[in-house]
Amino acid sequence: MGIPKVTVQCECGDKLLIPYGAAQACRCGRSWDTQQIPASDYAALQATLRRFRRNEAAFVMVALGVVAALVLVGRAAPVWITIPAFALAWLRWFRPWWKARKQSRLRDLPTWTLTPSGGPKP
């Protein structure tokens, strides 16, 4: 997995995806350097995202384990009944709640204002 990218909105309107710790020039001539972001802040952001991905993967693994256990003990009929109900509950209630919770946690993290070097003056 590569270095996660930072989205930078240039003053000219372009959006740049720059790897953390790197610099990149926009078409307008401004150069953006993501090393202006404190390493501790960026590490906190990455830790939060990793935690949410791990929790989602764990939830899926538990669900698959329950399905596999039911199939192995010969109780596959309840699986075919509960899978649609589980999918509906997941898509209708759990997923929107989880997404809102994740966005709320991400909103609480710090944001950064990068200053460009070079390029046209605003």
Image (cartoon, rainbow, N blue to C red):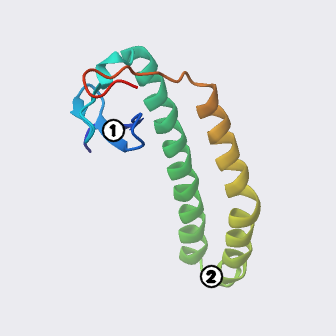
- Residue appearing at x 55%, y 44% in the figure: 55
Judging from the image, what secondary structure is the residue with disc 2 in? helix
Q: Is residue 66 above or below residue 119?
A: below
Q: Nearer the viewer, mark 2 or mark 1?
A: 1
Please report whichever mark, 2 or 1, sits nearer to the chain's N-terminal start: 1
Give the number of the disc on residue 61: none
Q: Is residue 66 left or right of residue 40?
A: right
- Residue appearing at x 23%, y 28% in the figure: 22
Which residue position holds label 1? 4
Q: Quadrant of residue 67?
A: bottom right
Mark 2, Cα crowd under 10 Å, few <14 / some 14-19 / many 20+, is some
Which residue position holds label 2? 76
- Residue appearing at x 26%, y 25% in the figure: 21
Q: Is residue 43 left or right of residue 78?
A: left
Camera-nearest residue between 87 and 40: 40
Judging from the image, what secondary structure is the residue with disc 1 in? loop
Camera-nearest residue between 74 and 102: 102
Q: Quadrant of residue 74?
A: bottom right
Q: Quadrant of the N terminus?
A: top left
Q: Identify the amino acid type marked 2.
A: Ala
Q: Is residue 53 above or below residue 111?
A: below
Mark 1, Cα crowd under 10 Å, few <14 / some 14-19 / many 20+, is few
Q: Identify the amino acid type marked 1.
A: Pro
Where does the image place residue 122, in percent across and percent down from the top left?
Answer: 40, 26
Q: Is residue 119 left or right of residue 108?
A: left
